[in-house]
Amino acid sequence: MRPIKVKQLNYELTPTAGLALVGHLLKSLAPALADVDAALPVRTGVASSDIVRSYLGLLVQGKSDFDAIENLRGDKFFKQALGIGLLPSSPTLRQRMDAHALPLAGHVVPMIERLLTRHAPDYGVLPCGWLPLDIDTFVMDNSGTAKEGVGRTYAGVDGYCPLAAYLGSHGLCLDLVLRPGTQHSAKHTDDDLRRIVPLAQRLSAAGPKAPLLARLDSGFDSSALMACIESLNQHGLPSVDWIIKWNPRSTDAAQLAAERDAAGAAWEHPRAGKRVATWEQTVEVPGVQRPVRRVLRLIERTIGSRGQHLILPEYELEGWTTTLPARIDAQQVIALYAEHGTHEQFHAEFKTDLDLTRLPSGKFDTNALVCRLAALAMNILRLMGQRGLLGPDAPVRHQAKRRRIKTVMQELIYRAGRLIEHGRQLLLGLGANDRAAAVFMRLHAHFVCTA
């Protein structure tokens, strides 16, 4: 076996050739980035749009720490690929994001809308014809820190509880709103809905032209929120239906079972010692004029799952409030809500793949900006995965409807390349043994045409 010698070459290499693809996607956001510079002008130094470009360049590599920019200070390819005029230092990046966190965050959502409108992704319409809009909160564990807004969350750890909104079945994020750890799920959600739902309607009108189905868990079981969603149905835009998990609160499940027996209701018996009743009832919600129904499911167990006979029956009561028409029966409503659980995978991608479990700043507004930029970065990577990793020329992977963010980074962002400057042109050379070269060049050509 021949020994391997190591030497430093006299030409430039990059381990992140995929940033060239990210750069072309950012070109389609040029008007929005120009608006950032117009709103936050600087006399000298790093432009405000370069702050956004630089931090997005970190996020798509799975890095959220400001200090990570220092390793790229002499990297010509990083600047050229992302169209950065002047690369900020770590202190400059932090200070500028601290100083202009709120106005910068206000510009990110229009960037998300422009990106998704221009590149028309496959959102993933449900077989029943509705386009899901999944809205939920999750926990970011920031224990052991004194960051602004960190508090005791419902998961029993100190951190934040951001609210995320995903359009479609494939995890395209419309917004990631940072919230203090102690904030209840339903608090101020009406303000977020008034921004998120119309955005989803506009994107659906520009793309699949499908009605929306908002899905929320029992933390949002509020007649005020139901009325808020209903008020956002506007003529000329896709309609919005919703399924919200019912919170039984103090409902007596044993008494309800006795009432079902007295009424002679039918029960299903999936196994010995377990019976299930499913039924519907009409409910009135203030501010909602059309019919609203609630699907209820009551499970009674007298024998445990391991065959142990119980002294007293155990009851499990669940319900789902919805505006879906009667042709969508009770079992379909339950199944549609069960698919809402897929969004937990998208939460995990934010926390692990994009390295956002522990946010980088001590200031709440700066971390809120980081979360919104992370939503934009997720959509950039999601588009790359859809266009590049699901076709016949993609690197060998198991069959899937979508690729997780980490896979996109591994297969498209972290590609070795050589930066060649010749005849006033820059050429990115891929290795002869690069199995992803064909799909990389196809993606590059596609994004150049759509930039």
Image (spheres, rainbow, N blue to C red):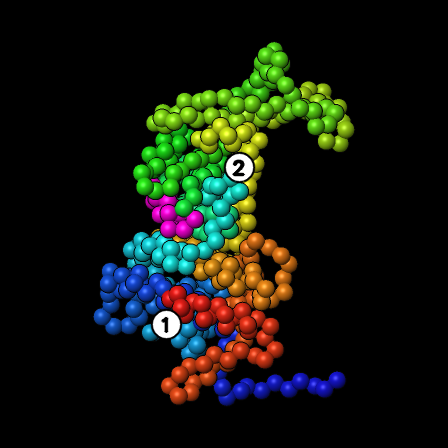
Kind of element beneath mark 2? helix
Does residue 275 lie above or below 185 as drawn? above
Q: Main secondary structure of the magenta part?
A: helix
Q: Residue drawn 46% across and 84% down?
A: 420
Q: Which residues are magenta?
A: 194-208
Q: Residues within 10 Å of mark 1 (few under 14, many from 20)?
A: some
The location of residue 445, given as percent across then percent down, is: 45, 71
Q: Nearer the viewer, mark 1 or mark 2?
A: 2
The location of residue 243, given as percent across then percent down, is: 47, 34
Q: Which residue matches tag 1?
A: 83
Task: Pick whichever, 437 or 215, lies toward us.
Answer: 437
Task: Pick whichever, 378 or 382, lies toward us.
Answer: 382
Residue type, numbered disc 2: Tyr
Q: CA distance from mark 1 to mark 2?
A: 43 Å
Does residue 340 lie above or below 424 as drawn? above
Q: Residues within 10 Å of mark 2 (few under 14, many from 20)?
A: many
Residue type, numbered disc 1: Gly
Q: Quadrant of residue 448?
A: bottom left
Mark 1 or 2 closer to N-term?
A: 1
Q: Residue drawn 77% across and 28% down?
A: 307
Q: Which residue matches tag 2?
A: 337
The location of residue 46, given as percent across then percent down, is: 31, 70
Based on the picture, tell me whether residue 29 belongs to the magenta stretch.
no
Kind of element beneath mark 1? loop
Based on the picture, tell me whether residue 200 belongs to the magenta stretch.
yes
Task: Pick whichever, 145 or 344, lies toward us.
Answer: 344
